[in-house]
Structures are given as structure tokens and as C-alpha cells.
Amino acid sequence: MARWLPIAIKAVILAGSVVLIAVLPRYMGEFRLSQFTFVALYFIALLGLNILTGYNGQISLAQGAFMGIGGYVSALLILGRPGLELYQLDPPGWLPLGDGMTPVFTIPIAGLVTGVIGVLFGIPALRLAGVSLALATFAMAVSMPTLAKRFESVTGGGGGIGLTLPETPFGWDISTRHWLYYEAWVTAGIMFLLAWLMVRGRLGRAWRSLRDGEVAAISSGVSPALYKTLAFGVSSFYAGVAGALLVIEVSFINPDTFPVSLSILLLASAVIGGLGSLGGVIFGALILEFLPVYSQDPPLISADFSTQAPSVVFGALLIAIVFVLPGGFAGLFRRLGLTITKLASRAGQARTRPAPSPSDS
Amino acid sequence: MADFLQQVVSGLASGAIFASLALALVLIYRATDVVNFAQGEMATFSTYIAWSLMNHGISYWPAFVLTLVLSFLGGAAIERTLIRPVEHRPEIAIVIVTIGLLIALNGLTGWIWGAEVKAFDSPFPNDTWEIGNVAISQQDVGTLVVTLLTVAALWAFFRFTTLGLVMRAVANDQAASRLVGVRVGWMLALGWGLAAVLGAIAGMMAAPVLFLDPTMMLVVLIYAFAAAVLGGIDSPIGAVVGGLTLGVIINLLGAYVDFVGSELRLPTALVVLLAVLLIRPQGLFGHAVVRRV
């Protein structure tokens, strides 16, 4: 009985979430809807970061910057050369930009390009054990806006590039915001499935073994350089997809669309949601979207805090989680689940055997 | 040629600021084996304290000293309260705590003092010395002198005092130090305090040039990372040499290479960081990491 219970609980939660996500738009205005579209794309970025940090034990502070790369790839492809000419931009001739694309199709391309850039960046950054990746990615996240401003002829500089909102395809009778919501969540679902397949198989085992005991992993033939770089590439791929979705949703990109603070808060949310748990990622995404809103203007109490309050709350929450709840919210729920399973199995045993032996506890 | 020398001097001055912060990073790395991502925000916070003190009518140097004392206490208190509970946890936990501190301190600074940019007094005259036809800014020289004095004082502390010796012992081997009766925990707190002092000096030297705002030290922190990695993350001399070298390199590239200009200075630091990691991960003066299996 105890064996199938956790699986059953997970299946019920998953099915419930899918139904919830599908019907949620019926009860929400456009603004709320847009917030939940953001939850979906944060969910994707955090899945990638969780693979890297949670399953492979490496810290990246550049997930937001990689989202920026994906965002720019998507924006440039959507506009194409004719569109960019309207902005009087003159990207170099060797960039294969094409004549403009349907936004949806740029999402996988943005992911792949960002993934390749991630792999290239990861090769030097992963040379040193421990904290070198964190240092290099932090430097990258801070440099990213400067770089985007410098290469104005491609990125439009500080003024940025505006896109037009796409129309709902296939003649569906829903608004553009609804379409973008479903687009984001369907992508999130695919990415979740992909992450689950990677993490449960050979790849995930290799990643976890490098995290938990590098020497033992190497002795068993797991190449640290290969798998660490791969983890970084995968996490960049996720960031690229999320960045493309973000740019399509807000129909605009400039160097400050993806600030350093986004990269830092993504890492914080990944930890708060729960490292090493794909399910926990949803808590991280919800917190990243809604904590800034509610910590500035908290419900129930009538107080209006400083615009800086979210940072203070975020930082304090992050430290508190590391102190008392190393598994994040996912760890908390896992513990609750274990307790329920234990109680259920005890109840089951109590039914079959009226007097349980002391060794059961 | 005159212009070149001027660029070198002003590069040394900004390099001195990088060096102070890099030295703070190295101190903590040697003591706790962790890179403190909140070092820049701690420095910014200290600088705001100095600004407040001066705003209340205290003149520069007393405010400077008082800020250093407060920063020392603050740094030690952070080690005691936030780092000590995770001391024996995996490295990743400590790094995440320092990142949490970065986020919280940045918000707190903005909450207390507001996000608008503030001017910060400089103790040095805004004037130049003419040597031959080279104009040297007194501000630059002052920054350089203050930093070098700090480094010399720190070196003397570690070299000639018993407390310095004990702190070096703790950095070398915590277990052995504990066995001979050293209060290791307090020595680590002392290390964090000293690092906070170095950060405060860097912040107060940088503020007249960069102007004071809550993200002032973010960019400086990246340069300090690059400087520390260039010099070797576990080498104090390396941090100073790395900081000065990086300051000069970046200033010269910015001034003479059109492609870099003023905008690509920061990405240049990133390139330096990556190049060092790729070619010589232990840096100029650091020790190669030997892992015992």
C-alpha cells in the first residue's frame, strides 16, 4: 500500500495542476493572465537552473543573462532583416536573420542558440572546481547589458526593439493574451517532461553522481568536463526558451529587460523552491512572480512598504530557507508526504494486525 | 607620452580600489574557503554610513575612522550570525547565504537611503600636480596612498603581531589551530571584520568618483573578482598586484583601443577572468589546487 501511495499522490497533483492551468484563464482578467504567463516562463528558466544547480551542484548567476540572449535571438528572428531596417538597424551580413518568422517557431531556435553559447561559455568557466562558475557567470550577468548597449547595430542599443503582438493562430476564438498564456504553459509542459526524462535516466544519474562525489563518479567513468558542460548547456537552452517567451509576451526588448537582479533572483527562487526537485520549481516560479508584488503592498495589513522591500524579503527568505529548510518548499512538502505515507501505512498495518510490534515505528 | 603616463596613474588609482576589494575577498576566501558575493554590497552599506555621519556634521577623517570601526563590527557580526550556522555545510550553502546577504543588503540600502544618486566628499583636493608636462590628479594619488597604507598596515598586522600569526594559522589549518587552543570561530569573525574594513575603504575611495548609489560597488565587485582570480584567489599579494594590473590594463585599453572604448571595460574584465581560468587557473601568485583522493 505504501509503495503506490506517493506515486498516486504525485499523479493526482500533476493531473490537478494541468486542469487548474487549463481552466484558470476563465476566472482571470488580462493582467492576472499575463502574470501567470510570466509564472510559466520563470518555471522554464528555473527548471534549467535546477538541473544545473540542484542536480549537478553548480551555481550559475547568469540564468537571466542567458534569457536575454534567447530574447534577442527571438526578437531578431521575428523581425528579420526587413523589420530591422524599419528600426534603421544594420546587423552584419553574416548573421542568418531571414525575412521574419512566426514568433512560436523562434522559441526552439532561441533555445538552441543559447544552449550552444552556454556550452562555449561553460568550457573555460567549468575548469576550476567549486565557485569559479559562479564568479564567471556573475561577471557575465553584470556585463550583459553593457554588451547589448555596445553592439547597437544589432540590438538597437538602449532604445531597444519593439515587436507587434502576434495574432491568435488557426482562427481560434481567444484573445492574444490567452493564446500567449497557453503557448507559454504548453511549452512549460514539454520542457517539464524533457527535464523529467533527462533527470530520471542515465544523464541525471551522471549529474547527481558528480554533485555528490566527484572522485567516485570519475572512477566509475563519468567524465566531469563532459557532463558539467552538458548541464550548463541544457540550463542555457531552458533559459533561451524562457527568454524568447518573455520577449514575445512583452513585445519589447532592451538591455534592461534582463537585468542582473533577474539572474540573482532566479537563483534565489530556485533555492527557495527546492534544489534537486522538479516539482519544487513551481513554488520558485510563483514566488519570483508574486513575492515582489505582495511584499510591496501586502494583503491583509494596510501598509505600503518601500519599493526596496521585495529585495529585503527575498534575501531574508533565501537565508532563512538555507538555515531551516535546505530542501526548500519541495523539501517541506516531501516531508509532509512522507509523514502522510507513514501514517497511512501504519493505519493499514493496524487494520491487518491489531497489535503492531515496536519495531514498526 | 604624457597622456600615456596620466592614463597609467589613473589606472593605478582605480586599480587600488579593485585591489582593496579583491584583498577583502581573498581574506575571506582564506579564512572561510568561500567567495563572499556580498562583499560589494557590504562596502556600499559602509559608504552610506560614512555619508550619513558626514551629513550629520562630522568631518571627513573622524567619519572615515568611525565607519571603519562600525564596518569591522558589522562584518564580524555577519560572520557570527549568518555564516557560522552554515560553516560545516557544503560550499554551495555558504555561497547561497552570501548571495542572500547581497540581495537583502542591496534592498536595505535602497530602503534606508533611497535610490537617488548622492555626491560623496573627497578628502583630497580636486587639483593636479604638474610634473614635467604630465598632469597627475591628486585624487588619484590620494586613493593610491590610502590603499597602499592599508595594505602595509595589514601586512604588518599579519607579519608582526601574535593575533596576525594566529589568524594565519587558522587560515592554514583549522583543526590544528583548535588543538593548540585557538578560538577558531572568533578568528574567522575577525577575518570577516577586517574584510569589511577593506571593503569600506574601497567604497569610500570609489564614491567621490563613481557617486553614491545602491549599486555602486556591483561593477567594482566584478573587477575585484577578476583581480583576485588574476592574482590567485588565495594570495593577498596576488590580490594587490592583480588589482593594480587590472586597473592599468583596463584604463589603457579603454583609452587607446577604440573597439573597447569606455563601454567594453567591464566585458574586458570578464574576458580576463575567463582567460585566467582557462590558461592558469591558480592565477599569478596562487597555489595550484591539489586534490587528495
Image: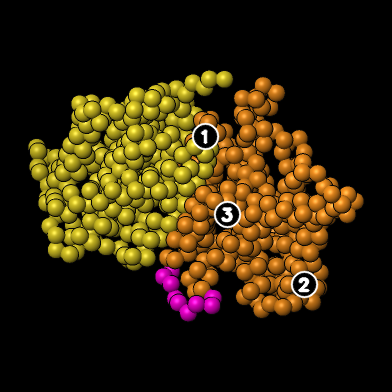
Chain colours: A orange, B yellow
Q: Which residue is mark 1?
A: A130
Q: Residue B272 in the image: x percent, y percent?
A: 42, 35
Residue type at mark 1? Gly
Report the residue at 42% width, 26% height from top: B175
Q: Residue A176 in the image: x percent, y percent?
A: 70, 73
State whether residue B2 appears in this view.
no
Give the quadrant of the C terminus of chain B.
Answer: top right
Report the residue at 49% width, 74% height from top: A297
Q: Is residue A38 left or right of residue B40?
A: right
Q: Which mark is residue A23?
A: 2
Answer with the quarter of the image where residue B187 lies. Answer: top left
Q: Residue A147 in the image: x percent, y percent?
A: 46, 49
Q: Please state the extent of the stretch shown in magenta in the rendering.
A: A299-307
State whether residue B279 appears in this view.
yes
Front one among A255 and B106: B106
Front one among A245 and B235: B235
Alpha carbon distance from label 3 to label 1:
21 Å
Q: Residue B197 in the image: x percent, y percent?
A: 27, 44
Q: Which residue is mark 3?
A: A272
Residue B289 falls within the magenta-colored stretch: no
SS for dot 2? helix
Which chain does the residue under circle 1 lie in? A
The 10 Å Cα crowd at callout 3, few under 14, some 14 to 19, many 20 or more, is many
The 10 Å Cα crowd at callout 1, few under 14, some 14 to 19, many 20 or more, is some
The 10 Å Cα crowd at callout 2, few under 14, some 14 to 19, many 20 or more, is few
Front one among B13 and A342: A342
* Majority SS type along the magenta span: loop
Front one among B61 and B242: B61
SS for dot 1? loop
Alpha carbon distance from label 1 to label 2:
44 Å
